[in-house]
Image (tube, helix red, strand yellow):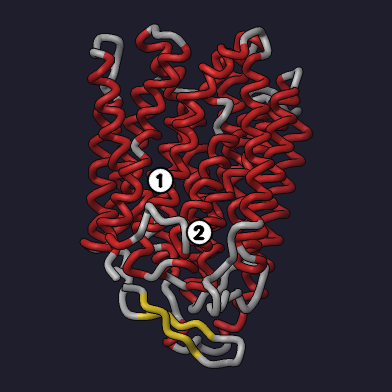
């Protein structure tokens, strides 16, 4: 079956799973970014400073870093049906908390906790990989990610108008509360409408839990090295909240959190050793090996693409509002152009990966991303607004095609570890967002755009070290027999 034969107009078989799952991701993204287009209203209603607004933007993506790692492990163990339902239900409650907050501290806590909903993406990656073969998985994952990511654009287009329609000082609170209600209802709908695998298929689970399995000594070291930036990003966030930043945390509390991060890293290091100590005593059979460098390169690629999208989607409404002096509703609608491209660009990246080659598609996407952000860095008040929007959409096309290309590869590395690989790769997207948004608090938007473009160029070079997925990967059935799964 060719990659073009996915029946999008059908609501049966794997098409039904695809539609139910991208809609779950869509709703999670609406909840995750429901505050961004309403920041102008929130700033006026709550009397927030620019530093406090910047803090909320960073907090919104912070918890997603460890959450994607943890959820990746849990989805591999318990399955995507249960995990997506629980995540949507949990996030709806936190959404209500944010809508009812009456102080910056409460808003900051709620926004930090809502970062957990960003881990929903990882759950769907495993679900889609179970239902679609390798020849279709790039396009299917692209549709899932692209149409789900459109939730941020939908929030930007709808929520400001909804808040104005409700009216009053608290119109934005009701708009936020409505998104929480939708998430709560759909958490039950999803649980009763899907299954983890097609009938008769095996859901492969990791042999050990607590850390990702690697298959060589070199990969063991690389795994530890690639874990460090996750904690560095969280430490950067703590610094932002310390007295050196916005003083949300006291000096003592900041040092306490730093100590907690060190303890958490030591705990992870212990589990990495516990799960993978056998690689130092006996070699893993060739048939069961995979190369962790594939994961490492995809981590960097997602940092440069999804990390950029998270950061840009968060700041673009205010950027358009401040640069061109347009209304909050207009700024939200125009800024949604960046996320709007998800509808076609991310599926296109997955489709081209299936048809033209995964490494080639990722390389071309990152080249376009580099050029796109260089051009966005030129935008100023002298530009015609339509031209600025057009450049934004063109840049977004390549950014999201790159995301589609990344997750056209993730399910083809090691099936039973797909959730964990997706979790780590997804977490790197949030590392990028935290770093980029932190830099934005010190530099102009123009320098911010150029910095992202430079990172994309560096990543494009790193992609050349990656191997094109080919052949088959092996998984062991419960009865001990080996099943070979095509990856091309």
- Decide if residue 280 is in sight here: yes
Q: Of helix, strand and loop, which one carries label 1?
A: helix
Q: Is residue 399 above or below residue 354?
A: above
Residue 211, image x, y percentages: 62, 67
Residue 459, image x, y percentages: 33, 50
Residue at image mark 2: 17
Q: Is residue 168 above or below residue 234?
A: above
Q: Is residue 10 above or below residue 136?
A: above
Which residue occupies the foreground of this view, 185 or 361?
A: 185
Lateral position of residue 366 relative to residue 317, left or right: left
For the N terminus, give its image quadrant: bottom left
Tell me which corner region of the image, top left, top right, bottom left or bottom right, holds residue 50.
top right
Which residue occupies the foreground of this view, 369 or 479?
A: 479
Residue at image mark 1: 146
Residue 398, image x, y percentages: 28, 42
Which residue occupies the foreground of this view, 26 or 384?
A: 26
Q: Nearer the viewer, mark 2 or mark 1?
A: 2
User: Residue at image x 43%, y 63%?
Assistant: 410
């Amino acid at each position: 079956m060719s990659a073009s034969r996915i029946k999008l107009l059908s609501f049966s078989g794997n098409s039904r799973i695809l539609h139910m799952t991208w809609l779950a991701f869509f709703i999670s993204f609406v909840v995750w970014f429901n505050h961004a287009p309403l920041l102008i209203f929130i700033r006026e209603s709550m009397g927030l400073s620019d530093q406090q607004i910047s803090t909320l933007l960073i907090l919104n993506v912070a918890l997603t870093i460890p959450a994607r790692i943890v959820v990746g492990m849990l989805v591999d163990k318990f399955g995507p049906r249960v995990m997506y339902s629980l995540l949507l239900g949990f996030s709806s409650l936190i959404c209500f908390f944010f809508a009812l907050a009456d102080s910056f501290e409460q808003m900051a806590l709620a926004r930090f906790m809502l970062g957990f909903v960003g881990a929903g993406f990882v759950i769907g990656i495993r679900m889609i990989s179970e239902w679609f073969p390798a020849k279709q998985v790039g396009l299917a994952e692209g549709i899932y990610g692209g149409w789900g990511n459109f939730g941020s654009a939908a929030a930007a287009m709808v929520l400001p108008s909804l808040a104005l329609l409700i009216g009053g000082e608290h119109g934005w609170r009701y708009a936020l509360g409505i998104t929480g209600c939708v998430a709560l209802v759909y958490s039950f709908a999803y649980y009763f409408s899907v299954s983890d695998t097609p009938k008769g298929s095996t859901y492969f689970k990791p042999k050990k839990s607590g850390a990702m399995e690697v298959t060589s000594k070199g990969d063991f070291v690389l795994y530890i090295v690639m874990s460090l930036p996750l904690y560095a990003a969280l430490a950067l966030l703590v610094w932002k909240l310390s007295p050196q930043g916005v003083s949300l945390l006291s000096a003592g509390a900041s040092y306490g959190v730093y100590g907690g991060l060190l303890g958490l890293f030591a705990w992870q290091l212990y589990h990495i050793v516990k799960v993978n100590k056998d690689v130092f005593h006996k070699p893993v059979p060739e048939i069961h090996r995979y190369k962790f460098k594939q994961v490492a390169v995809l981590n960097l690629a997602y940092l440069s693409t999804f990390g950029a999208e998270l950061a840009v989607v968060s700041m673009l409404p205010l950027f358009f509002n401040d640069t061109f002096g347009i209304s909050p509703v207009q700024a939200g609608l125009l800024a949604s152009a960046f996320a709007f491209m998800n509808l076609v660009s991310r599926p296109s990246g997955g489709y081209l990966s299936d048809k033209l080659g995964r490494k080639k598609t990722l390389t071309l996407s990152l080249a376009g991303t580099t050029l796109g952000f260089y051009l966005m860095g030129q935008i100023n008040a002298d530009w015609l607004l339509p031209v600025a929007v057009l450049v934004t959409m063109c840049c977004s096309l390549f950014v999201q095609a790159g995301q589609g290309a990344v997750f056209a590869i993730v399910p083809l590395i090691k099936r039973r570890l797909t959730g964990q690989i997706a979790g780590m790769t997804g977490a790197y997207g949030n590392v990028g967002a935290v770093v980029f948004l932190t830099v934005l608090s010190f530099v102009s938007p123009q320098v911010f755009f150029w910095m992202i473009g430079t990172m994309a160029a560096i990543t494009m070079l790193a992609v050349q070290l990656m191997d094109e997925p080919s052949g088959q990967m092996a998984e062991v059935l419960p009865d001990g027999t080996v099943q070979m799964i095509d990856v091309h």
